[in-house]
Image (tube, coloured by chain):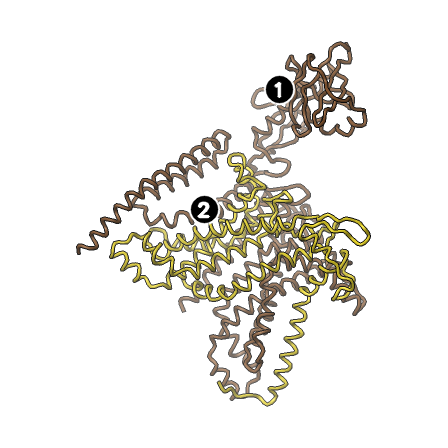
């Protein structure tokens, strides 16, 4: 579209460009720094942005490989970073799958079926979802402490307990999927019902195949949310080799034992794949969120 | 008409064959649940047993009755919400009325049992010990110090078995090497966990480095759950107000047990100056922090959104991708990176500041600098979200409005004030409230960045200058200074009310928007 352009447009464009570049430098500073730190020998800040004598010692630590320094001392890895990453991925995949199963069927009922208390249930779920899990941590701790006496794999310090505790996060996803289901024309299922399909068959063979995009979005959203979850995991998990990445990464920066370099390498090692997943998912997320969101 | 009927016949056949499997599955789940319920009931966990019984029977009804067919789809997700959101909330409120804490952690029956299990060395019989080692296995030889003929040797045991009981007999011969005193000293903490049972069923425990002694029950049970100390003859009565066993002299005996104490925890929050002072201070900072974060991130996000959507800026796609990066990195990693960068002595930020201006701010020990640091980091984390939001909203504004204002000779500031802001503010408000609620409870940021510090000095509970309500609650509940779950739950109760209000406001704002 032809806009009316002011005469000083050229200067304005350059001013905007300079501002954006300066802003980007500021934003990128932490990322560049952390990469630089991960290649520096020792756990200190001193050193230039491009390390003068680069060392792979922190990367060896992050991968759990013992490292021999130039002066002959052998350094053992302090933390099982790869185990933490595996724990995080395992818990996230299992929990996201369960969340997907629970919220899809729930959303189907809310979008298509009639039953009593529907509006009330929807509204109360919306309000309940606002309460942060941190507040119920005491209850989670007490509940799983007691449950562990009856079902050992649901006790404190088990991945089962963490997975179960995360299943409360279905409400938001029910809203998302419900919005998407409502955007699909009901006529398809109705005609199937006339042909004699049960509600389950209509759901399984007609609605589900049409909803793959939103299901992918919900899975990714749940996955990302759980990978980054800290409070519940920090209370329920205690053993070093049971921690998730979010809890474990915190161990590096103790004031008494400040392993800045080791943290940097681990952060890049583990943050990079998650970031890439996120960036790939981003495109689908935006379209899926706008398709499912903001519809009563 | 014939065809659908036929199809229906086939389908109903399928349903019937599926029913057998369904019944078997429901029955299997119900049997497993009944087993757990019985276990729980037997151990006195009546609340848990009731909840599972109730939810289990509703589930059975929903999946077997035709009337409840539509509920079959909702029930699993409702179950998730009830079990993992509603039940913990109710449980939290319940805990708020108890003195559940690190000193009163266990139910009454367990505490009584712990006291009854206490023993003391009666001092009647003493046995000198010598220890033999055979590979991993150890054997103790105990000789009565009064008449040296009475001697027993234990069965072989390993350190991994401890704590445990090992029986001893005079007929057993010790194998392996006799250990020197310094080896026994090394093993003393393990040996203290060992109980030796003699053939006459009397038990011996380690009383000193060289001796094992006879052990006797410290308490015997009296009337009305009271306990009588066998050593001194004192009587301890359970006090169900404070949750401790108390002697006649008013002396409390640890550990205590959990009892209901009514509104005490709530009263403490409102009246104890050591809690009330920090509480209001922390509430103030929580609101300030959330408001300022929403404001700053909105301003930065809106500005950037306007810039990257400005047509004359041809290369804006690159900026867009790079600007979203802080949003793509998981928050726990970014926050920890900043914790390192802001470090007083090792951090790069102070290094740069020192080289440029010769200053080294104390980001973590100065209250105001710590708060500033939190806001800086939170803006860095939060602006991309606002940018994405406003980018979407800006696209919806018709171009000809700007065209018309340009003809009228308006500058960008006029456009912003009279076109952009009025056009996007309405759909933005519910999102801003949601963002406010998120930051109101942004536990991960506070806990990973400052841990709440620097600590407030006049507080009777662990409280810090940068603590927000949720992190304050967390520290009371799981902090290193002793855990007070009851008080933490009471404060959580207060936060429920505040968060509930925000949620209600958000719902109102959203539905108002939809009506228009």
The circle drawn on residue A140 is none
Q: Nearer the viewer, residue A131 or A146?
A: A146
Which residue does the numbered mark 1 point to in the structure image? B220
Is residue A21 shown above or below B352? below
Quarter residue B106 falls in: top right
Q: Is residue B103 left or right of residue B71?
A: right
Q: Chain of mark 2?
A: B
Mark 1 and mark 2 lie on one chain; the one further toward the N terminus is: 2
Residue at x-position 53% and y-position 71%: B390
Is residue B482 shown above or below B402? above
Both marks 1 and 2 on one chain = yes
Q: How many marks?
A: 2
Q: Nearer the viewer, residue B274 or B152?
A: B152
Is residue B476 shown above or below B339? above
Q: Nearer the viewer, residue A233 or B78?
A: A233
The circle drawn on residue B82 is 2
Q: Is residue B302 left or right of residue A289?
A: right
Quarter residue B330 falls in: bottom right
Check the image and name the residue furthest to the left: B1
Residue B198 at x, y = what percent?
A: 67, 15
Residue at x-position 36% and y-position 40%: B60
How packed mark 1 is, by other alpha carbons closer than 10 Å (few <14, some 14-19, many 20 or more), is: some
Q: Quadrant of the C terminus of chain A?
A: bottom left
**SS assignment at label 1:** strand
The answer to whether residue B287 shows anywhere in this view is no
Q: Colour of chain A?
A: yellow
Q: Colour of chain B?
A: brown
The answer to whether residue B425 shows anywhere in this view is yes
Residue at x-position 65% and y-position 12%: B200
How packed mark 2 is, by other alpha carbons closer than 10 Å (few <14, some 14-19, many 20 or more), is: some
């Amino acid at each position: 579209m032809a806009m009316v352009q002011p005469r000083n447009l050229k200067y304005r464009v350059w001013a905007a460009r300079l501002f954006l570049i300066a802003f980007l430098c500021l934003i990128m500073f932490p990322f560049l720094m952390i990469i630089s730190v991960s290649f520096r020998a020792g756990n200190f800040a001193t050193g230039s942005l491009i390390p003068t004598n680069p060392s792979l010692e922190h990367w060896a630590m992050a991968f759990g490989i013992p490292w021999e320094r130039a002066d002959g001392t052998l350094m053992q890895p302090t933390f099982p970073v790869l185990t933490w990453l595996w724990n995080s991925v395992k818990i996230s995949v299992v929990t996201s799958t369960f969340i997907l199963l629970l919220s899809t069927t729930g959303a189907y009922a809310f979008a298509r079926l009639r039953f009593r208390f529907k509006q009330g249930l929807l509204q109360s779920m919306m309000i309940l979802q606002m309460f942060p899990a941190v507040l119920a941590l005491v209850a989670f701790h007490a509940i799983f402490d007691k449950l562990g006496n009856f079902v050992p794999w649901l006790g404190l310090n088990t991945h089962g307990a963490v997975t179960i505790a995360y299943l409360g996060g279905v409400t938001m996803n029910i809203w998302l999927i419900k919005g998407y289901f409502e955007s699909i024309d009901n006529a398809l299922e109705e005609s199937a019902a006339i042909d004699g399909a049960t509600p389950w068959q209509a759901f399984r063979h007609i609605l589900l195949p049409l909803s793959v995009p939103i299901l992918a979005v919900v899975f990714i959203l749940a996955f990302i949310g759980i990978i980054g979850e800290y409070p519940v995991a920090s209370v329920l998990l205690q053993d070093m080799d049971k921690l998730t990445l979010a809890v474990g990464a915190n161990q590096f920066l103790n004031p008494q034992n400040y392993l800045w370099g080791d943290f940097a390498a681990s952060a890049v090692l583990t943050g990079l794949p998650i970031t890439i997943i996120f960036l790939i998912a981003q495109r689908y997320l935006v379209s899926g969120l706008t398709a499912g969101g903001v519809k009563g | 008409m014939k065809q659908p009927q036929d199809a229906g016949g086939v389908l109903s056949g399928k349903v019937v064959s599926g029913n057998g499997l369904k019944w078997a599955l429901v029955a299997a789940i119900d049997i497993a649940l009944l087993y757990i319920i019985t276990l729980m009931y037997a151990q006195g966990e009546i609340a848990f047993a009731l909840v599972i019984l109730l939810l289990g029977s509703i589930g059975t009804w929903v999946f077997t009755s035709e009337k409840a067919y539509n509920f079959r789809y909702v029930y699993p997700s409702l179950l998730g919400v009830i079990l993992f959101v509603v039940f913990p909330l109710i449980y939290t409120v319940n805990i708020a009325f108890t003195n559940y804490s690190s000193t009163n952690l266990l139910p009454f029956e367990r505490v009584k049992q712990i006291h009854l299990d206490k023993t003391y060395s009666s001092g009647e019989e003493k046995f000198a010990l010598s220890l033999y080692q055979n590979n991993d296995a150890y054997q103790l030889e105990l000789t009565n110090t009064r008449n040296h003929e009475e001697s027993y040797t234990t069965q072989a045991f390993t350190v991994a078995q401890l704590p445990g009981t090992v029986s001893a007999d005079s007929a057993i011969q010790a194998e392996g090497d006799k250990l020197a005193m310094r080896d026994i000293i090394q093993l003393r903490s393990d040996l203290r966990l060992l109980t030796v049972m003699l053939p006459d069923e009397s038990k011996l425990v380690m009383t000193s480095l060289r001796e094992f002694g006879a052990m006797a029950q410290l308490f015997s049970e009296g009337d009305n759950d009271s306990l009588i100390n066998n050593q001194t003859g004192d009587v301890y009565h359970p006090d169900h107000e404070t949750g401790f066993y108390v002697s006649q002299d008013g002396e409390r005996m640890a550990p205590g047990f959990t009892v209901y104490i009514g509104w005490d925890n709530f009263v403490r929050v409102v009246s104890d100056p050591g809690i009330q002072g920090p509480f209001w201070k922390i509430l103030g900072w929580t609101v300030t922090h959330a408001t300022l974060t929403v404001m700053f991130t909105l301003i930065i996000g809106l500005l950037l959104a306007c810039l990257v959507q400005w047509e004359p800026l041809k290369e804006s796609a690159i900026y867009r991708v790079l600007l979203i990066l802080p949003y793509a990195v998981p928050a726990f990693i970014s926050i920890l990176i900043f914790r390192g960068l802001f470090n007083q002595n090792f951090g790069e930020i102070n290094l740069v500041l020192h080289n440029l201006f010769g200053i080294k701010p104390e980001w973590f020990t100065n209250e105001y600098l710590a708060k500033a640091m939190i806001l800086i980091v939170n803006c860095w984390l939060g602006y991309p979200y606002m940018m994405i939001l406003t980018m979407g909203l800006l696209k919806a504004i018709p171009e000809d409005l700007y065209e018309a204002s340009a003809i009228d000779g308006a500058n960008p500031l006029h456009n912003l004030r009279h076109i952009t802001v009025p056009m996007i503010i309405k759909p933005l408000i519910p999102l801003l409230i949601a963002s406010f609620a998120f930051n109101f409870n942004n536990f991960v940021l506070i806990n990973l960045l400052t841990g709440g510090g620097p600590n407030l000095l006049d507080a009777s509970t662990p409280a810090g200058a940068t603590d927000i309500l949720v992190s304050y609650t967390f520290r009371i509940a799981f902090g290193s200074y002793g855990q007070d779950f009851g008080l933490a739950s009471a404060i959580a109760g207060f936060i429920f009310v505040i968060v509930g209000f925000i949620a209600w406001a958000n719902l109102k704002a959203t539905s108002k928007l939809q009506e228009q």
